[in-house]
Image (cartoon, grey):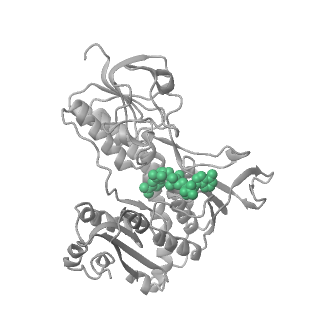
Amino acid sequence: MAEFDYDLFVIGAGSGGVRASRIAASHGARVAIAEEHRVGGTCVIRGCVPKKLLVYGAHFAEDIQDAQRFGWDTKGASFDWNILRDNVAAEVNRLEGLYGQTLGNNKVEVFHERAVITGPNSVRLSGGREITATTILIATGAWPSVPVIPGAGHGITSNEVFSLPKLPKRAVIAGGGYIANEFAGIFNELGVKVNLVTHGDRVLRSYDDEIVDRLVDISRHKGIDIRFNFAFKSITKRDDGTLLLEGNDGKTIETDLLLWAIGRTPHSTGLNLEQIGVELGKDGSVKVGDDSRTNIPSIYAVGDVTNRVQLTPIAIREGHAFADSVFGNKPRTVNYDYIPTAVFSNPPIASVGMTEAEARAEYDDVKVYKSDFRAMKNVLADRNERALYKMVVAGSEERVIGLHLIGPDSGEILQAAAIAVKAGLTKQDFDDTVALHPSMSEELVLMK
Ligand code: NDP
């Protein structure tokens, strides 16, 4: 091994890259990592973390309104975007520092430069230095997609949305996935007139239809304008700074801000991968096997750049499994079954396992149990917003193969329930558990 400068060279200090570096180093490997932006990657710097803080910040709008029904005088309450934005940025800076410290504590050498791969065991940093390593790990993540249409550059992406100088009066959010629905909720609560525009006939396609329909209904009721089947033709910026969005059908929408949230493309360009023969998928993803190894034996890839499942906890697991397997003599792979997910929309959605439609396509004997209820807090607040929980079961033993929730705190509730689903428990096991009363989560054991 000593013939190379390092045992492991990681490109990209996001969730997957940092975990892989730290674990490989703890197994005794000599590790270096290159990061051209900021240590922490998408999740910490311009994704999950700042987004969740904005979700909390925005939700005070409704909480303050509801508080009056609980006896609080909230007259004079006001909101300052600059304070929220700057406090979120400060928290992101703090976390970036912690990530850097973790790498330092584990003796991982950090190069704040872009790296390109020059061969199976070599990389070149943007400063010109050539480095060799026994193993190279590509952990460069994904990048927001922007369509190739005239004027697309007048829109922003989730990379820029956290540092807006001021909130717009009106925003069009293009897309109907995670980011679109989360930012529709955030902006709407902060007083922005939101128009969510997607090209298909559904939003959140991977989620259960009934749960998504409930979100669409509630979102519309809250004032979010949702438009389906709109194909963008061009974007024009007018002299007064407003944007004119034109659809293929000739219809136009005027707005102050356009946010592209139409998916994220694996960030594999400019790494010299084609030249050295690393196989890529049509979507630009780095092709890997179960062990995260590419077709070149010394080069591996984890996280969004492989486009297996674009989620932080998955990138972390892939990075960890890679490091344990290659440097810790503990070969293992990641289990992708029953991954719990949440959309931090308003209200949030959380889900694990098969949707009703997926289950019916796969099994003959599917049954669905439901609970459609108004959270106690919403009743007193006189907020006419109903939660919906769905349990999908299969077989005569009624094994739970899907659980789908929309309602307050559904992400928090689902994580615990996902353990039961992953463990293969049945509807009867849920029913045998005494309800924790009064709570929303008790509905999980009371479904009819
Ligand atoms: P998603 O893949 O979630 O959704 C993309 C959406 O954009 C779909 O609704 C798609 O519609 C629509 N779309 C695609 N092309 C166009 C177009 N040209 N015009 C209008 N609409 C279009 O992408 P996101 O960008 O929201 O998120 C990227 C990934 O990041 C997610 O897949 C997720 O894995 C991750 N993420 C996870 C979060 C979480 O866990 N809470 C939060 C944020 C991101 P259709 O389906 O009809 O093609």
Locate the N terminus and report the quarter of the image it occupies: top left
Q: Is residue 145 left or right of residue 273?
A: right
Location of residue 260 with respect to 392 vertically, above or below: above
- What x and y, as percent, mark residue 213? 52, 72
Quadrant of the rendered image containing residue 188: bottom right
The answer to whether residue 54 shows anywhere in this view is yes
Quadrant of the rendered image containing residue 316: top left
Residue at x 38%, y 28% (from the top left corner) = 295
Number of numbered discs: 0
The extreme right residue here reads: 239
The answer to whether residue 259 shows anywhere in this view is no
The extreme front residue here reads: 364
In front: 126, or 215? 215
Residue at x 36%, y 44% (from the top left corner) = 315
Q: Is residue 386 left or right of residue 228?
A: left
Quadrant of the rendered image containing residue 103: top left
Q: Is residue 243 left or right of residue 74?
A: right
Location of residue 124 with respect to 53 vertically, above or below: above
Locate the C terminus and report the quarter of the image it occupies: bottom left
In front: 72, or 158? 158
- What x and y, as percent, mark residue 165? 61, 52
- What x and y, as percent, mark residue 7? 28, 23
- What x and y, as percent, mark residue 130? 42, 16
